[in-house]
Amino acid sequence: MKLISFFLPFVLLFFADSLQSQETKMYRLYLKDKGNPSFSPAKPDDFLSLKSIERRKRQNLSVDDFDLPLDIAYLEAITETGATIRTFSKWVETVVVQLTDSETLSRVENLPFIDSLCCVWEGTLPERTDIRPDIRFDSDVRQNTINSYGVGFTQVALNNGHLLHDAGFRGKGMTIAVLDGGFLHADEIEYFNREQIKEVKTFSHEVNDALRDGSDHGTRVLSCMLSDKSGELIGTAPEADYYLFRTEVVNGEYPVEEDYWIAALEYADSIGVDVVTSSLGYFEFDDSEMNHNQGQLDGRTASISRAADRAASRGLLLFNSAGNEGANSWKKINFPADAEHIITVGSVDGDSVRSSFSSLGLTADNRIKPDLMAMGSQACVVDGSGQIIQSNGTSYSTPILAGLAACLWEASSDLNSYAMLDLLRETGNHFQNPDSLTGYGIADVYKAYLQQRTGIQPIAGLTDPIYISINPFDNRLYVNLADSEQYNRCVLNIYTTLGNRILTVSNLSGSIDISSLPKGVYIVCLRIGDKQWVRKFVKN
């Protein structure tokens, strides 16, 4: 990919001599235009990967001026002022520079192609140390099969992801980019197939090793999708390929992190990624004068939200966490969760009840947000030490749903990103009556799959209108109906093999607590009107 080989060494040259322990400020420069880049939409292979071009062709999306890089002459003129370029964006036409004196700032301000600027970071940069370079992994093949989802069954089954997996779709051939803060020991976790981690790349000015130092938040997020250890934990897209991009700065909270996020998103586009999941969001910073306000939650004001929306027009499917501010003073979704053409994901618990911390909508222009819900309360994740733990947050509901969407897209590869957005929203259990609490509700990816496969011969064993399964780890019996409106009209009875009725439940919510039942074989009888289905299950 010519853009990468041409521009990135240029930028890294700017960085090389600038990491010094002195008071520094970073400014976001808003350009008047892109200048006159020496590229043309007619020759996209000069600045996009073949995979990125093919993704556009597959979705009938054209390469246009938004895809063109910034004029190299602009970047050269900026560096000639004495400023150091940190990152830049072709989609929102911005450049972030660092400098240490007002004279340099004045020279930058007076450049004829600069429209305006604002400070996005201030502090002391870390000393440069010997760090691991960006990593591309070699293959290390390991075979796994799904025998049991282990402790993660509920978070997959809530969106009927296990049925989609049973239909043969586990994310194979799909690529997912994870934008996060750190991926501690992600290359050593026994639950992951290392061959599927294709690259680890840092976009922020942090100099510590993303795999060995700092946060394991990205590792936990990744585990929601990539985990593949039968009987212990199965993620939502265990056969997809992954790109791990660190955009966060651990020390401090400043708007420059949004610029790093945009740079990572544009890079994901350029290398041909299909799905992006981001468990990040912004509204409040160390310098309160830099804060966002709720009036800006319109999807068009904040640069990060505009870039997120632009991703969809390039054919990417982007998932972003709604945020965990539902019980705090801000309460609302964050940025870029307000972007229109992305899936903003809120959190529910294992009983489909909205998590109190899950951020609320609507947007400032009264659009439905969050879009959809998945399990983020007591989600089972793998931490940086390789242990399965339970953790809370829309940080986990987001990748859970993103992974399932990748599997759905694998099954429905003829759809473009906009059609995928619509399809997922339409399967929400509140689609007919969305609100600011749960948006369109809990997505049903298997329902979406069946909807796309109308007229195609169903897969053996999945033709019934009901599906009953049991999770031994949380002692719950799950009942999934093809028609969700039938839950309030059905009656379920559980019998022993001798015919003794031991439990009756009406108005099902999707799962039943069976912790009081001793080990053994049981018969389930489900009645809806004058129809009845009988199933057998074993409690171990």
Image (tube, rainbow, N blue to C red):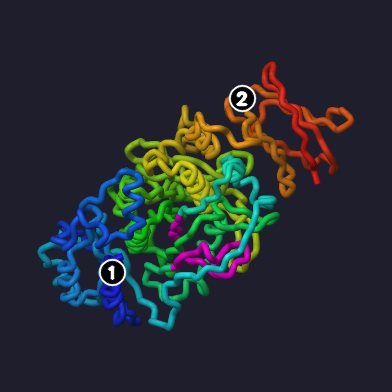
Find the residue positioned furthest to the top.
Answer: 530
Residue denoted by label 1: 26
Q: Is residue 458 above or below residue 77?
A: above
Residue 293 shows in this picture: no
Q: Residues within 10 Å of mark 1 (few under 14, many from 20)?
A: many
Residue 43 lies in the magenta-colored region: no
Q: Which residue is at the front of the view, 156 or 448?
A: 448
Q: Which residue is at the front of the view, 273 or 28?
A: 273
Tag 1 or tag 2, which sits nearer the N-term? 1
Residue 196 lies in the magenta-colored region: yes
The residue at 74%/44% (across/down) is 475
Secondary element type, mark 2: helix
Find the residue positioned furthest to the right.
Answer: 498
Tag 2 near tag 1, CB within 8 Å: no
The residue at 45%/66% (across/down) is 199
Q: Where residue 12 is drawn, which disc sits there?
A: none
The stretch in magenta equals 175-200
Q: Quadrant of the N terminus?
A: bottom left
Amino acid type of the residue tagged 2 in the rendering: Gln
Horizontal side of 374 relative to 249 (left or right) equals: right
Q: Which residue is at the front of the view, 195 or 8?
A: 195
Q: Is residue 264 above or below residue 410?
A: below
Q: Is residue 439 above or below residue 35?
A: above
Where is residue 105 shown, x and y percent of the image?
A: 19, 71
The residue at 67%/21% (across/down) is 528
Residue 35 shows in this picture: yes
Q: CA distance from mark 2 to mark 1?
A: 57 Å
Residue denoted by label 2: 486
Secondary element type, mark 1: strand
Where is residue 88 shown, x and y percent of the image?
A: 27, 64
